[in-house]
Image (tube, rainbow, N blue to C red):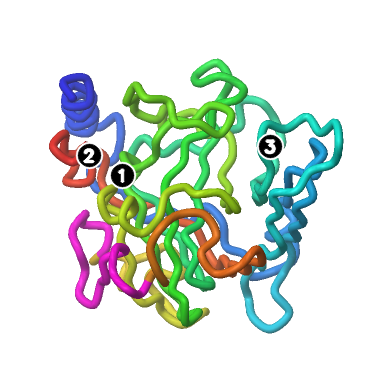
Amino acid sequence: MLRSFARSLQRVGRALAGEVPMNPQPMVLFKFDREREVDKWHAFTDAYFGGRSEASWALAPDQPAAEFSGRCSTEMDEGADLARAGYCCATSKVDAIGDYFDLECYSALVYTVSGDGNTYLANLRVDSMAGGGGDVWQAPLPTRADGAWTEVRVPLRAFVMTHKGRVVERRMEIPRTRVMSMGVSVSALAGMGPQEAGAAGVSQRPAPAAGAGGAATGGGGGSGASSSGGSAAGEESSSGSSSGGGGGGLLNSSTFRLLLREIRAEGRAGGEDDAPGKW
């Protein structure tokens, strides 16, 4: 906690010195409104190692969003190089080593999604020099069972380090300047659910219509309220009934379907989202 507090003070000091913006504007990282943008990601499953899960990542046929869908299976082939199966993910492609997403100025990521009531995982992979080749930072990404579009706000402090699918017990802060790729995943096994999402400070609110101004474009207007670090009007706690139930992993069945319209960074590093007491 003391290290986190020191890093927060360091960010504030750099902002006061003019090295980083004090109040950065929301930045759209991905907007999946056309095939060219969707092609920047790809799907991956445990089938690569001998599992039997299936997943696809493509432009949705009926709206400007990417569709991540498929079936998670705990079955595996004989001789599979797996300790356990039942895993599907979609992740951004890494074009070149050293081509990072620099999130130092920001405190949260906002995912505009329409789901099936399952709690997915938001994934961030950092440069191997900063975190190790098998290390992925993960946070719960709840969705509504009725398929309504929501903006899920995930504080960067909510991401925990995992190694080969297991949470690293020692609490560390994600290297915000060395994020190589972003992704979403789902598992047939128990994992983080709505209760964990609420405890981590993850929250939901209704999303604006596709093509609307403000939050959808990463500019002012609708995104301004949520970038303050507090709960905006109409915001819903991710631990409520809107997330579709309790527990972790796939809640409804082995099949899943998640629509993802946009991912943006917002909030002020060193602000309320980064308060040491929220760790």
Q: What element carries label 2?
A: helix
Binning the other alpha carbons within 10 Å of mark 2 as few (below 14), some (14 to 19) or many (20 upward) gives many
**Which three-letter amino acid code belongs to the residue tagged 2?**
Asp
**Which three-letter amino acid code belongs to the residue tagged 3?**
Val
The answer to which of 142 and 204 lies nearer the viewer is 142
Q: In this view, does 219 lie above or below 6?
A: below
Splitting the image into 4 quarters, where does residue 230 fall?
A: bottom left
Q: What residue is disc 1 on?
A: 107
Q: Residue at x 73, y 51 (%)?
A: 42
Whether 183 is among the magenta residues is no
3 and 2 marks in contact (CB < 8 Å): no
Binning the other alpha carbons within 10 Å of mark 3 as few (below 14), some (14 to 19) or many (20 upward) gives some
- Residue 251: x percent and y percent? 51, 64
Q: Is residue 232 above or below residue 92?
A: below
In the visual, does 248 lie left or right of 155?
right
Q: Give the range drawn in magenta.
A: 226-242
In three-dimensional space, the C-alpha distance between marks 3 and 2, rounded to whole angstroms, equals 28 Å
3 and 1 marks in contact (CB < 8 Å): no
In the visual, does 27 lie left or right of 165?
left
Binning the other alpha carbons within 10 Å of mark 1 as few (below 14), some (14 to 19) or many (20 upward) gives many
Q: In this view, does 165 lie above or below 73?
A: above
- Residue 247: x percent and y percent? 41, 57
Q: Which residue is drawn at 27% across and 58% down?
A: 227
Q: What residue is disc 3 on?
A: 94
Splitting the image into 4 quarters, where does residue 36 fall?
A: bottom right
Q: Is mark 3 on a helix, strand or loop?
A: loop
Q: Which residue is drawn at 55% across and 16% down?
A: 129
